[in-house]
Amino acid sequence: QQQVKQSPQSLIVQKGGISIINCAYENTAFDYFPWYQQFPGKGPALLIAIRPDVSEKKEGRFTISFNKSAKQFSLHIMDSQPGDSATYFCAASIGGDDKIIFGKGTRLHILP
Amino acid sequence: DVKVTQSSRYLVKRTGEKVFLECVQDMDHENMFWYRQDPGLGLRLIYFSYDVKMKEKGDIPEGYSVSREKKERFSLILESASTNQTSMYLCASSSRQEGADTQYFGPGTRLTVL
């Protein structure tokens, strides 16, 4: 119930392509869905986040698509660049609970 | 900018040693967290704290303890290090203000137990 399932575990995309990472959850009480980006040797940092009152949020080349009925959300990286190569974590939390439940992560590699 | 610092980037210890990992944040955040990160397992919560002297167990607290004597400092203690505690340890902090959901992470400490 408290899990967030993330796929794929690793992803290789050509420069300029679209990277897509998917996540699914079971607990319908989750009401905040962030994505964190982690570069080698660094801690994760918030990339973009969405709440379930909208189906899509876009910030630059990064878009979260949210499907409440399917309990799924995904990160799309348009025009992927080598500098986007990193590990991406989807996550979920419940309002009022300070804990965040993280997915297992996706290692993304963008080929130059 | 929020800054979370961890006392060591790399640490090598021997089995059975007592290990202290220190974390300091400079944003007056109420919440502080300790995670371990292992390949294929993601981020697993060890302990967290909502306030000074408060602590709550996370998902994998066995073999660990924590201390929070001051608001800005949260320490993770391995009472008797074992080889299966070799991992990357990440500290994070967040505010309890409504709507402030972001966790801010330190750079991590890579601990090797021989």
Image (cartoon, grey):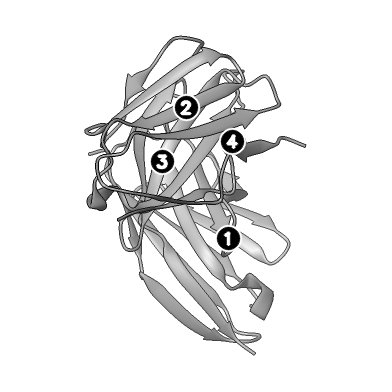
Label 4 belongs to which residue?
Answer: B102
Count of labels in the image: 4
Q: CA distance from mark 1 to mark 2?
A: 21 Å
Residue mark closest to the camera, 2 vs 4: 2
Q: Chain of mark 1?
A: A
**Residue A41 shows which numbered tag?**
1
Label 3 belongs to which residue?
Answer: B35
Q: Chain of mark 3?
A: B
- The relative height of residue A110 versus residue B113 in the rendered view (above or below) is below
- Which residue is rendered at x = 50% and y = 61% of the image? A88
Q: Are marks 3 and 4 in contact (CB under 8 Å)?
A: no
> Mark 4: which amino acid?
Thr
Q: Earlier in the sequence, mark 2 or mark 3?
A: 3
How many other residues sit within 10 Å of disc 1, few (<14), some (14-19) or many (≥20)? Answer: few
- Which residue is rendered at x = 59% and y = 56% of the image? A42
Element under label 1? loop
Give the left or right position of residue A4, taking residue A32 as reference: left
Front residue (pair A48, B19): B19
Q: Chain of mark 4?
A: B
Front residue (pair A16, B112): B112
> Mark 3: which amino acid?
Tyr
Label 2 belongs to which residue?
Answer: B75
Labels 2 and 3 positioned on one and the same chain? yes
